[in-house]
Amino acid sequence: MATLEVQGLEKNFGGVRAVQDVSFAVGPGEMLALIGPNGAGKSTCFNMLNGQLKPDAGSVRLLGQDITGLAPRQVWRLGVGRTFQITATFGSMTVLENVQMALLSHHRRLGGLWRPVAGMEAAPARALLERLGMADQAGRPCGILAYGDLKRVELAIALANEPKLLLMDEPTAGMAPQERVSLMALTAQIARESGIAVLFTEHDMDVVFGHANRILVLDRGRLIAEGAPAAVRADPRVREVYLGSGAVTGAH
Amino acid sequence: MENLVLQALSGLASASSLFLVASGLTVIFGVSRVVNFAHGSFYMLGAYLAYTFVTQLPRGHLGFWGGVLGAALLVGLIGLVVEVLLLRRIYRAPELFQLLATFGVVLIVQELTQMVWGAQDLLGPRAPGLRGSTEVFGLRFPLYELFLIGVGPVVLGLLLLLFHRTRWGTLVRAATQDREMVGALGVNQRMLFTSVFFLGSLLAGLGGALQLPRESVNLHMDLSIITEAFVVVVVGGLGSLTGAALAALLIGELHAFGILIVPKITLVLVFLVMALVLVVRPHGLLGKPEVAARGGQGSAEPMIGPAPAALRWLALAVLALAVVVPPFLGDYAISVLTELATAVLFAASLHLIMGPGGMASFGHAAYFGLGAYGAALAAQWLGAPMLAGLALAPVAAGVFGLVFGYFCVRLSGVYAAMLTLAFAQIAWSVAFQWVEVTGGDNGILGVWPDAWAAPKLVFYYLALALCIGATLLLRRVVHAPFGYALRAQRDSALRAEAIGIDAFRTRWLGFALAAAAAGIAGGLFAYGKGSVFPTFMGIPRSVDALLMVLLGGVQTLSGPIIGALAFTGLQEQLVRLTDLWRLILGVVIVALVLFFPQGLAGAVRARWEARHGDA
């Protein structure tokens, strides 16, 4: 069974049809990229998957369970991790504490009024940071971290609830090219090992064609192409959308 | 029937006066985003200045109307000076700081006004040519009231013309919508802000001056008008002129007819309407949601950690002094120390909301007062022993914290602050107007501790133990997962929701927890004083709490404790030493906002970190 199954998703803002009749599926361990020019509806699509936006029509199923219209925190409880285009972390906490928060929430221990956080879930949080190569940054406040490091922290947070599905909105935006490749390689490895389905949007075509198993192309709210990287690269409609709209393959 | 028409007319007259004041407030807010507490002081100054001008100038039309307009102009200039000297420096400060700074101006103006004009009420002359009354449906209606009814729409019309037909007005409207964009387009923002402030203050002064023939001029005009003006502006939607007109109409008529229908609860009614409007339309009748200033990025709030060793030792030393010294002190000193202990808990409870919670509360005194009244009412009507009363205090405050908080924590920024203020005023009005139960203004007397705790020293130790215990518990909570969840939703609501944290519920429970803690402080305060009064929930007490927290510093855990000690000690000394304590307090507030925006503990910490090279 597919991890995520999307059927006939639709969203209108006033008269603007931001997303129309979008359907696709992602399976365990698969890296699926969602690409398209600016304003194609990628973020809208994304925000409907984890509940930040309610779709006007269509359904979202996670492992067969209908999660359409659930709130983000409910979606997260069912096993969907999320990273944001503009990183969102808790700036007044350390890197380690940020990950601890996700773990504490996952184990429903956030109501505690007595035991200090300092010793709670510290070991698994460290293990997660270790896995992402962030162990040496564990004690630093997130508020002063470099952007690329914040992206890694977000990934660590997103992995804390042992997700079945990872939603990554431009996971490598703002990173140096070297970092991009290593982060996506790591993501792909984790996805494979843990059987996590990964759906990501991305502007960097090197990242997309280098790491995605399959690619969805969105234009003006509609899916215009879907398939393996080579097939999508050769698709004339995709070429028209990108070259016609002035974007150049390989640009940021 | 005729009576109803007269009532409606007098409602229109008060609506008109209210609109004059509220329009200035809303225009100032629209452009500068400053909620100006001192607006009521400008109104009061307008009345006093008009009194002086009108009585000094030769009698007649020129003397009267010239005096009124002269007063309005002079108030406009005073407002301009305040803007240039103070507000201009704090446009980027958090809302509560601005509110506090302008409240400092309120205190200063109050004291100066009293020095110049004295404490007694002044009665001005009536307006020439409008002294008599006219017949409306066979009943007499004062001509001056009719004149006032006309003034409101005329001023509204003139303002609309000004804003829609002049370049300056267009700029003001543009700045109301998007201040940064107007700045980016190269408009001289300083001039714009200063001129808007001049206009707004002038309108307040005019509103005050026009009251001269209507009512006596006194020193309470400032706070009574500003609360009403806040209500009007918030109900209408901050920054909306037409909204203010609509809301003034609503509130004016509500007053007029409220007295007829439910004379007991007129005050409650007004704030109830405001709370209702904010619940249904969080940005007022015609207001627009504020453009979010912050992105998803975690804010730069500092981290919290365990107290450094030096601080621990200092705290232990102070605590030891607080335990060892009192047996050698007199009764008066001991009651001051008891008050200090309750102040510490009161401030610490507000800090939980403001610091880790990141919420604004301008009505925290409500929960202090509800705790006090809970204990006092139990003692008065149920004959409850002291310990039962003290146990009831946090429950009463906590329950109301849950109910009021349910609405307050949905809003943010100025609107949240205003809604907490509205609920506090509702609680205050009930205590003030429900005389049969609460004793009204006379309060409830004879709330004394049980025999075993009657000696001042014993009660002091009880208060110390409970307040320090509860304060330490709150500290503990901040370090525990719940406190972290509070900070999480403050730092990034987006991320908090994305990892399963229910931001609303976290804020709500945090608010109620703080309310309950404030209730303990209030209960102890009631037994310590032997009585409770509506002033326990008044705006000045909410401001006290804010001052304690901000004086100490919002961003450190020890801030509220240091702030409470500093503030209560300072106030105690000032009241004893000088009659000018309000003036000095006002200057201290203004200086605090200008020079120590991080508070005392924040300033010390900054130095500490600079010296010890902390991250």
Image (cartoon, rainbow, N blue to C red):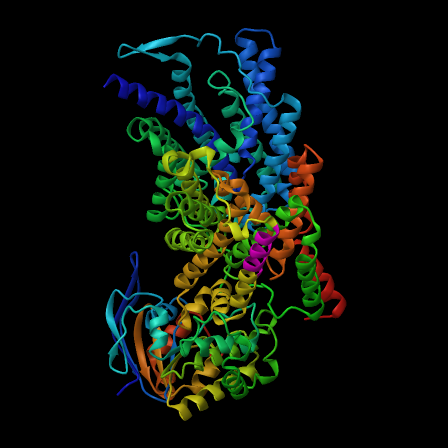
Where A137 sits versus B224, above or below? below
The residue lying furthest to the right in this view is B611
Q: Please check the rendered image and state whether residue B89 is part of the magenta-colored stretch, yes or no.
A: no
Where A78 sits versus B554, above or below? below
Quadrant containing the N terminus of chain A in the rendered view = bottom left
Which residue is pictured at 44% across the width and 78% down the height?
A158
Which residue is pictured at 59% across the width and 21% down the height?
B49
Q: Foreground: B386 or A213?
A: B386
Which residue is pictured at 40% across the width and 90% down the height?
A194
Which residue is pictured at 39% across the width and 27% down the height?
B15
Q: Please check the rendered image and state whether residue B458 is part of the magenta-colored stretch, yes or no.
A: yes
Residue B185 visible in the shown view? no
Residue B61: x and y, percent? Answer: 52, 8
Where A26 sits versus B41, above or below? below
Q: Is residue B222 left or right of residue A220?
A: right
The residue lying furthest to the bottom in this view is A193
The image quarter in which residue B11 lies: top left
Which contiguous range is marked in magenta? B457-468
